[in-house]
Image (tube, grey):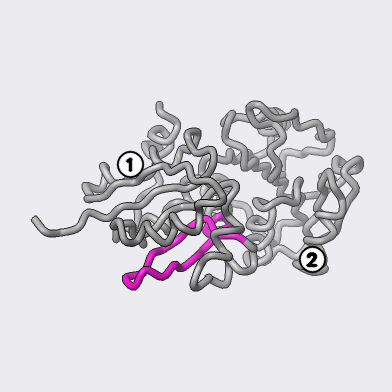
Amino acid sequence: MTEKIPLAGVIGSPIAHSRSPALHRHWLESLGLQGHYIPMDVSHENLAEVLRVLPKMGFVGCNITIPHKVAALNLADAVSDRAALIGSANTLIFRDDGSIYADNTDGYGFIANLRAGAPDWSPQDGPVVIFGAGGACRAVLASLIEAGCTDIRLANRSRPRAEALRTEFGPKITVYDWVLAGSMIEGAALIVNTTSLGMVGKAEFKVPLDALAPDMVVTDIVYTPLDTELLKTAAAKGCTTVDGLGMLIHQGAPGFERWFGQRPPVTDQTRAAVMGW
């Protein structure tokens, strides 16, 4: 038996909380594929050395998470257009010669999750509201603009970060002060929380939600808890809600396919495996 078993994993610091190992193990087992997916806690000062050694150890690629997404992009030998636009990498492919190709599938995962959870939503339905202006927002913005959204309302607790995104992504974005964030919701078709507000261990999401209406779609990239207070409030007002777990699952599919040779399905069993149900 001389066939090499492909190895992949996820690099971050900390990393013990990551759901990605459960996701990829489920796919490997359900598809009957050879391979392993390993969580690796790597410090910033060791990242470059580790990434160069992994291909020599039989790794075909890896996911990158906080706080290494920007550094991984800068360490790559080649970069996809979408990773360059977003400014960070979450998926690395190790080529046969040991070179590193960097991609970012976060935006793809967001849109795929949105279309699965709200199949009737269309970019032409109306304005999009986004809370937050961090790294996740960059991926969401890029994917929504690519999908055809032309009216995006953006608010961040630090307004200069939001203004910087408007400068970079263009006039489709209108920036609001955080204290007026609730007013952005009026007449919107899609509301997206890209902040950590509402996550377990983080501050509450306290933006006024009085303007929510039943014809709106509301999604939260937070998935711990799965049903955030934002989603609970939106559901009570009759909105279509989309939780953040699907984004994690869908963003993992392209990398898995590149590493292990088969496109994995996204099913109810996948969600259950990731959450440990």
How many labels were placed on the picture? 2
Residue furthest to the left:
1
Q: Which quadrant of the structure image shows residue 211? A: top right
Mark number, residue 80: none
Residue drawn at (40%, 26%) of the image: 277
* Residue 202 drawn above or below residue 189: above
> Please, what secondary structure does the residue beneath circle 1 have?
helix
Residue 91 pos. (x, y %): 48, 58
User: Is there CB contact under 8 Å for labels 1 and 2?
Assistant: no
Mark 1–mark 2 distance (CA, rounded to whole Å): 40 Å
Whether residue 181 appears in magenta in the rendering, the answer is no
Residue drawn at (84%, 34%) of the image: 208
| Amino acid beneath label 1 | Arg
Residue indicated by mark 2: 172
Looking at the picture, tell me which residue is in the foreground, 252 or 5: 5
Residue 54 pos. (x, y %): 37, 57
Q: Residues within 10 Å of mark 2 (few under 14, many from 20)?
A: few
Residue drawn at (82%, 68%) of the image: 171
Looking at the picture, tell me which residue is in the foreground, 162 or 242: 162
Residues rendered magenta in the picture:
88-107
Circle nearer the N terminus (1, 2): 1
In the image, taking residue 209 as reference, residue 271 lies left or right, namely left
Mark number, residue 25: 1
| Amino acid beneath label 2 | Lys
> Please, what secondary structure does the residue beneath circle 2 have?
loop
Looking at the picture, tell me which residue is in the foreground, 91 or 77: 77
